Image (cartoon, grey):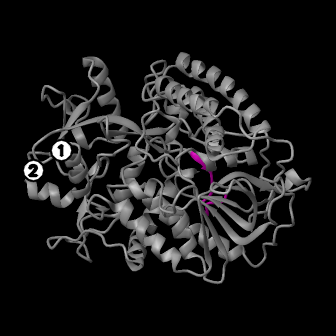
Amino acid sequence: MSSTISSSIRHDVLIIGSGAAGLSLALRLRPDIDVAVLAKRALPEGNTLYAQGGISAVLAADDSLESHVQDTLRAGAGLCDRDIVELVVKHGPDNIRWLIQQGVQFTRDPASETEDGYHLTREGGHTHRRVVHAADATGRAVANTLENAARERANIHLYEHHTAIDLITANRLGRDDNRCLGAYVLDNKSGEVRTMLARFVVLASGGASKVYVYTSNPDVATGDGIAMAWRAGCRVANMEFMQFHPTCLYHSKAKSFLISEALRGEGAHLMLPNGERFMPRFDERAELAPRDIVARAIDREIKRIGSKFVLLDISHQPADFIIEHFPTIHARCLELGLDITRDPIPVVPAAHYTCGGVLTDAQARTDVPGLYAIGETAYTGLHGANRMASNSLLECLVFGELAATDIERLMIAWERPPEVPDWDESRVTEPDEEVVISHNWEELRRFMWDYVGIVRTNKRLMRARRRIDLLRTEIIEHYSHFRVNSNLLELRNLVEVADLIVQSAYRRRESRGLHYTLDFPHLDPLQRTPTILIPDRYRPRTPGSAD
């Protein structure tokens, strides 16, 4: 491949990520705004596609906004930003209606007390039934609907199989300000690196659960947006709070297949292999306790009895009910020889959701002017120390709407970015040993699981930090001398994110929410503030720079 590349590609808005956050933002922008959406794989591939449970919103007559707020605050273990929680909850019902207008077919129930007759389920941490869903494949319904709508919009340009390498900021070009101007982007198929410029850039690239060896997430969840924002000078917050979903299917032929929390919402029991129910011993809410409590309980029981899994049993419910409400899970388990209408499901915890991320304000703005972050990439203050079930897609939609409103307001006055230097490949060669990348991938994910997983200690954290430093040195050397590819870029980002997780976990000298350490097993009421990490390149916004 030649070291010369095509000239810059320009759009008004560049959205890095094609899940619910990115596509909802793109669709909410006016048709006269030129939008680019990047997807690392095929367009819908991401966490949205695999979300099973649903979206929480106050739709029932016996529910209230305040109840949803209180449930979220309780799950967040004292670290939620109440103003943000109220903002998101308030916008919830209208965003559900917007999805319905786009064509999402949520499950209906003739006996429903909701205005539109939708079936609502209840999940861990919720005191009411408020989770609207499309059977047990809500994410797929949302992702497919938004994809179809985006493909019909002439102003939305879709770049599939494109990986963002790094953000382009003005101060890297010698200017005084730190405005985001665009990104260098790798075309995964051709190997070409493109310079993509935009008035506004939005990080909507999802979380970083791929940093662990066991995860419910697809392969694309490598923390790209968080790492790029950190390198560009953005603060990140609460990276110690990595949520482990309690119930991922344990089977040699099932990779990252999630068993929805909605099963427990509909009465499924967690049991030891001998049939003993154990959750009532850990929490009065039993299987409906928040995910951090359930995941720790499973982890403890697995280690206590020396098992590789526990069992999740919903077979006491009528078979027709199970098949109607959980057709995807039922069908997948049948393929593997499990009939969930009769058999319990072997499950293990798995890394599931990144509660921390790039620090933003109530309009999704980051510390870098012109750069926004939405969805799992962002830390808005909604989740605090633990994400309540089904609040994640809600956050994607609400902040997609808020960011779109802010971008439209600023669009006329925000100048077009200047020309920037193209990506320089004049001094790099083809990679000589790809095995180095694959081995580093495996090592990183294994020691993060062992040392920075569900239960932590300072000794384990320091072991992880030493290994991260060694890996980073090798990766930087590889990145500096060889042509980039998607595996190298993702590994580079994961090492950065792993370091942020370890730094954050070491700073929190207590156990709260998803962060549990044997060195400080109790909650410290004086630590009720987010853990905020500040990069070397951080520059506080000047007054009026976001307006």
Q: Quadrant of residue 419?
A: bottom right
Camera sees residue 65: yes
Magenta residues (range): 357-365
Indicate whether 437 appears above or below 339. Answer: above
Question: As drawn, which residue projects farthest toward the top?
Answer: 459
Q: Residue at x 43, y 47 (%)?
A: 387
User: Is residue 495 left or right of 540 when viewed as pictured?
Assistant: left
Three-letter amino acid code at disc 2?
A: Gln
Residue 27 x %, y %: 54, 75
Instruction: Say left or right for 169 vs 367.
Output: right
**Secondary structure state at the residue bearing disc 1:** loop
Q: What secondary structure is marked by label 2?
A: loop
What is the x, y in percent for residue 484? Answer: 71, 45
Evaluate if marks 1 and 2 touch, with contact meaning CB atoms under 8 Å apart.
yes
Residue for badge 2: 317
Closer to us: 412 or 3: 3
Q: Looking at the picture, how far across and down is residue 207, in whole percent?
A: 53, 47
Which disc, if any, is residue 112?
A: none
Q: In which image quadrant can residue 531 be found? A: top right
- Mark 2 neighbour class, 10 Å CA radius: few under 14, some 14 to 19, many 20 or more: some
Asked if the magenta segment contains residue 105, the reply would be: no
Residue at image position (11%, 48%) is: 341
Q: Tell me which residue sits at (29%, 46%) in the image.
A: 259
Residue 268 is marked as: 1
Q: CA distance from mark 1 to mark 2?
A: 8 Å
Q: Residue 189 placed where, x, y %?
A: 63, 56
